[in-house]
Image: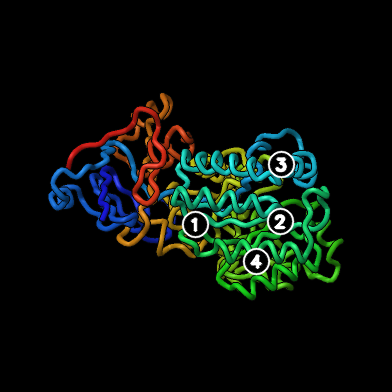
Amino acid sequence: MTITALRGRLLSFLAAPEGAGDAASYRYTSDGVVVVEDGRIARVGPAAEILPTLPAGAAVDHYPDDLILPGFIDAHLHFPQTQVIASYGAQLLDWLQKYTFVAEQRYGDPEFAERQAKWFLAELLANGTTTAAVYGSVHPGSAEAFFAESERLGTAMIAGKVMMDRHAPPALLDTAQSSYDDSKRLLQRWHGRGRQCYALTPRFAITSTEAQLEAAGALAREFPDAYVQTHIAENRKEIEAVRELFPDSRDYLDVYDKYGLLGPKTLFGHCIHLEERERQRMAETGSVAVFCPTSNLFIGSGLFPMRELARRDPPVRIAAATDVGGGTSYSMLRTLGEGYKVQQLQGTNLSALEAFHLVTAGNAEALGLQDEIGSIAPGRYADLVVLDARATAAMAHRMEAVAGDLEEELFILMTLGDDRSVKATYVQGRRMHEREGTRSRSPA
């Protein structure tokens, strides 16, 4: 049995905060220890109680001034788009043609896909992200490369090859049958293998024929525990195009609903311009609306109506994501900062407590993984991030004015922080990333 431990200021959420000041929503330990046995959290508590129980000479990674949280969870991003991030001057449909489809053709080369998978997952870990829902390219080898690297690292990932049989360059097209066959083969190989999960991934309705959506629906019926991920209502012209392509559907969501693609394990990226019936149907089916603020702003798509969706009865379930490469940062901290601004533009706020709950326990619940990740509690995987709110001179200067105020510290992290604030990232209790010069190990 392998035993390791981390010591520092521990923060984990117990429930969704009702807003700023909701101290009952979280557990904070000013000097705590997380004991890890064989990759999972065995014990958590104050250092004064835990340290005397550790074996003599046990090594403890000590971060006395830093916050230790569950690893961040990113509910929507694109593995083949790392080299189109920050591409100038286009909105969604033009952006896909001008940048994305050009870049994704390279992923037909297995060696290229393997190199990119290694870079991509290392970058996620450098930003404190330990779990993500990820789109591959249309090529089965892109998903194979991604899963193989994730398995090597021990991370929990959800991914799938894109299904796309029209309105894209010939080199990026599959067929309804080949997408069914390839997706089924990948699903059977990877779904539930260790910490890997498969997501059926029709890119969006514009690039899938009815035959392909039926194939995706057939797979969803065959494998009801698999995820489904796609896009919806991101852009007004996109919605108009879907209306023309599917004239018999009541609205955009109805296109997917017709083929049985809605449900608690379905992740819909964007959901900015949903109609009232679509919102109600998403709530009824438990489908998840994924908030991608940096992408929505950068591509000019619109403002995500977070409060309107969350305050419905029943509410629409919500997750948060970077949406790289339309999104402009791999950092969930930067994502939360932009999310705050999006809410400000709509006359509401996103408190720091709500924000950090969203990218830890909240996203874990949205993905149905709350019993495995998202909180610092016995039995959960020891996927953890260590955050430094004084990582830059500006942050340290700002922190001088808020000493001892946890919520202010969190707000500084989400508005001024980025990958520089990630001092270390742990996967199953193993340090998989550390900022240079930050290691602090001491005997128990």
Image label count: 4
Judged from this view, the residue extending furthest toward the bottom is 221
Kindly report the distance in space between the C-alpha atoms of the residues bearing marks 3 and 2.
18 Å
Looking at the image, is mark 3 or mark 2 nearer the viewer? 3
Q: Residue at x 41, y 56 (%)?
A: 374
- 180 left or right, relative to 16: right
Q: Residue at x 65, y 49 (%)?
A: 303
Kindly report the distance in space between the C-alpha atoms of the residues bearing marks 1 and 3.
31 Å
Q: Which of the labelled discs sits on residue 106, or is there none?
A: 3
Amino acid type, label 4: Lys
Kindly report the distance in space between the C-alpha atoms of the residues bearing marks 2 and 4.
16 Å
Q: Position of residue 58 (x, y in %)?
A: 19, 45
Q: Position of residue 227 (x, y in %)?
A: 59, 64
What residue would you read off at disc 1?
363
Q: Position of residue 130 (x, y in %)?
A: 46, 49
What residue would you read off at disc 4?
184
Determine the secondary structure under disc 2. loop
Q: Earlier in the sequence, mark 3 or mark 4?
A: 3
Q: How packed is label 3: few (under 14 Cα within 10 Å), some, or many (20 or more)?
A: some
Q: Position of residue 423 (x, y in %)?
A: 38, 36
Q: Earlier in the sequence, mark 1 or mark 3?
A: 3
Looking at the image, is mark 1 or mark 4 nearer the viewer? 4
Q: Residue at x 51, y 61 (%)?
A: 367
Determine the secondary structure under disc 1. helix
